Amino acid sequence: MSTWFRVHNDVLDNPKLILIAESDRWRYLGLLSLMSQGVLTKYEGEKLDRVISAKMRLTNSEWEETKRRLQEEELIDDKCHPIGWEDRQYASDSSAERTRKYRERKKKKQSDAGVTSQERHSDADVTPPDTDTDTDTDTDKNTIGDIPAGKSPRQPVPFKKIVDLYHEKLPELPRFEELTEARRGQLRQRHVNNLTSLENWGHFFDYIRQSDFLMGRVEPRPGSRPFRANLEWVTRHANYAKIKEGKYHNGRFLSASSNPRAS
């Protein structure tokens, strides 16, 4: 049975995919498909290489060269698994996960029905239920504004101030107009787990400015568009880690004086 897997809409601007040959991009997409089918986790070693070669209609030597290039670009790991796969797929995409949740809901519904039946046939006095109608409401919208970090009593994540600071510090980079659910989650994760304050966000944006690659100052390959980072791209977990480690700064790490703490 055919199933879907997720490919995010920034794929045309992904710097790693821009820098590899068109044939390798297609083969990388093939690996995503094989990962979704479970092929890459079912086999290993030489058996896995033979299966991949057969699935992609490649000779063994063609696949070995393709594998080497994709690993050099850090698109796949030593097991041929696409790097960052789990960050972009969700358990809810799995039919097994949907089946499990359906069964849990059905079991709970049956259990609740049983309790209601027992109460209806009980001779004991029953205290009327609490009729308090106060309810929590979720007013999150796809607009930029300060929204609490989850439902816990944490200090709100200053989404609007972070976005305004990005525009102020990096006006050359693409503007950040719409705060979608995915973008809100990325900003929340980076704020809670890494940057923690507007001052640290400012240091982070200043550090990005030092990178010719992230700022779009690197001449692209013939036929390719120049890459420029944006706020959504730099706040993804994998990309943030590589920026912090100096991958796009010729090995110059995000220094302790910049003050964002490690994950």
Image (cartoon, grey):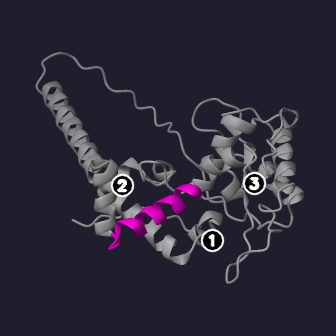
Residue in the image at 24% along x and 39% along y: 104
For badge 1, the amino acid type reads Ile
Q: Which corner quadrant holds the N terminus?
A: bottom left
For badge 2, the amino acid type reads Asp
Query: How would you rate the neighbour count of disc 1 (Cα within 10 Å): few for under 14, some for 14-19, many for 20 or more?
Result: some
- Image position, residue 231 (x, y; %): 72, 57
Compare residues 237 and 111 and report the one nearer the observer: 237
- Which dot marks residue 18? 1
Task: Name the residue that disc number 3 marks.
Answer: 248
| Callout 2–callout 1 Cβ contact below 8 Å | no
Query: How would you rate the neighbour count of disc 3 (Cα within 10 Å): few for under 14, some for 14-19, many for 20 or more?
Result: some
Q: CA distance from mark 2 to mark 3?
A: 33 Å
Q: Is residue 70 magenta?
A: yes
Residue in the image at 85% along x and 67% along y: 172
Q: Quadrant of residue 69?
A: bottom right
| Residue 108 horizontal side relative to residue 173, left or right | left
Task: Name the residue that disc number 2 marks.
Answer: 93
Residue 91, relative to residue 260: is it above or below?
below
For badge 3, the amino acid type reads Tyr
| Residue 167 horizontal side relative to residue 248, left or right | right
- Which dot marks residue 176? none
